[in-house]
Image: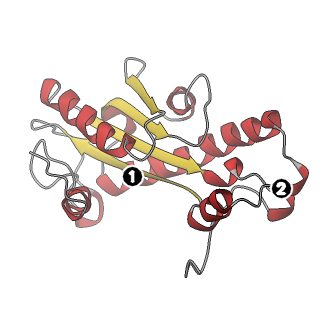
C-alpha cells in the first residue's frame, strides 16, 4: 500500500493499454515534456520575478525518456529567452540529475554573476510502465512514480534584475540558491557551499 492519494499521468489510463509501442510512447513523451516544462519554467520565472531574457543558462533533467533536440531547445522557441542563452540537457543520471543541475548552475553563475539560471526537471514515469508486465519490479515502479515537472531559478551574485514577485526573494543571498532548494538538499544530507 503506497498511501498515495493521487497520482498524475500524462494520459488517461485507457491510453496506456492501447498505446504500448515505443514510437507512440516517445511521441507522447515529447509532447508532455514540452507542455510540462514550459508550464513549470513560466511559473518558476514568475515566482522569482526573473524575466526569461535574464536567463543565461537553461538546464533540463529527465531520466524517463529521450528527445532530440532536448526540451530546452523547444522552450527557446516558445519563450522569450535570448538567442545566446546556453542549453544543457542532463539525462541518464537516474536519481542524481537534480544535484548535478544545481552544481552546473552554481558553476555558471560564479562565472556569470549578472545572469540567472533556470533548472527544469520533468519525469514521465507512466510512459515507462509495461502494462502487461506483472513483475514485482514493474508493479512497484508503477505504484511509486507518477508524472510531473518542477523548475527553479537561481541568480548570480551581481544579478540586478526585476524585483522578486509577491515578496519572495529570487535567492536567499546573491549567488545562492533559493532557500527551499537548500532546505531540501540539507534534508537529503547534501551540503551546498
Q: Position of residue 100 (x, y in %)?
A: 31, 37
Q: Position of residue 174 (x, y in %)?
A: 10, 45
- Residue at 42% across, 47% down: 95
The CA distance from mark 1 to mark 2 is 38 Å
- Residue at 76% across, 41% down: 25
Q: How many marks?
A: 2
Front: mark 1 or 2:
2
Q: Using residue 98 as the reference point, say whether residue 102 is left or right of it.
A: left
Secondary structure at badge 2 equals loop
Q: Residue furthest top?
A: 84
Q: Using residue 92 as the reference point, say whether residue 9 is left or right of it.
A: right
Rendered-image quadrant of the C terminus:
top left
Vertical order, 138 against 90 (above or below): below
Q: Position of residue 2 (x, y in %)?
A: 56, 77
Q: Position of residue 37 (x, y in %)?
A: 53, 45
Along the viewing direction, whichever of 71 and 9 lies nearer the viewer: 9
Indicate which disc residue 132 carries.
2
Q: Are marks 1 and 2 in contact (CB under 8 Å)?
A: no
Task: Answer few, some or many: residues within 10 Å of disc 2's Cα (few below 14, many 20 plus, some between 14 and 19).
Answer: few
Along the viewing direction, whichever of 106 and 41 lies nearer the viewer: 106
Q: Residue furthest front?
A: 135
Vertical order, 62 against 36 (above or below): above
| Mark positioned earlier in the residue sequence (1 or 2) | 1
Q: Using residue 131 as the reference point, say whether residue 56 is left or right of it.
A: left
**Residue linked to disc 1:** 44
Along the viewing direction, whichever of 111 and 115 lies nearer the viewer: 111
Secondary structure at badge 1 equals helix
Indicate which disc residue 68 carries.
none
Q: Residue furthest right?
A: 18
Task: Answer few, some or many: residues within 10 Å of disc 1's Cα (few below 14, many 20 plus, some between 14 and 19).
Answer: many
Amino acid at each position: 500500500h503506497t498511501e498515495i492519494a493521487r497520482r498524475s499521468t500524462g494520459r488517461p489510463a485507457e491510453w496506456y493499454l492501447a498505446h504500448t509501442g515505443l514510437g507512440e510512447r516517445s511521441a507522447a513523451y515529447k509532447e508532455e515534456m514540452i507542455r510540462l516544462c514550459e508550464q513549470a519554467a513560466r511559473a518558476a520565472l514568475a515566482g522569482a520575478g526573473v524575466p526569461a531574457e535574464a536567463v543565461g543558462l537553461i538546464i533540463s533533467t529527465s531520466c524517463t525518456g529521450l528527445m532530440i533536440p532536448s526540451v530546452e531547445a523547444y522552450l527557446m522557441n516558445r519563450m522569450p529567452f535570448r538567442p545566446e542563452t546556453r542549453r544543457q540537457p542532463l539525462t541518464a543520471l537516474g536519481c542524481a540529475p537534480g544535484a548535478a543541475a544545481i552544481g552546473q548552475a552554481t558553476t555558471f553563475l560564479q562565472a556569470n554573476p549578472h545572469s540567472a539560471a533556470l533548472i527544469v526537471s520533468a519525469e514521465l514515469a507512466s510512459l515507462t510502465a509495461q502494462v502487461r508486465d506483472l513483475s514485482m519490479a514493474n508493479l512497484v515502479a508503477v505504484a511509486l512514480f507518477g508524472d510531473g515537472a518542477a523548475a527553479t531559478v537561481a541568480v548570480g551574485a551581481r544579478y540586478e534584475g526585476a524585483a522578486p514577485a509577491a515578496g519572495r526573494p529570487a535567492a536567499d543571498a546573491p549567488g545562492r540558491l533559493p532557500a527551499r532548494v537548500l532546505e531540501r538538499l540539507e534534508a537529503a544530507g547534501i551540503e551546498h557551499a
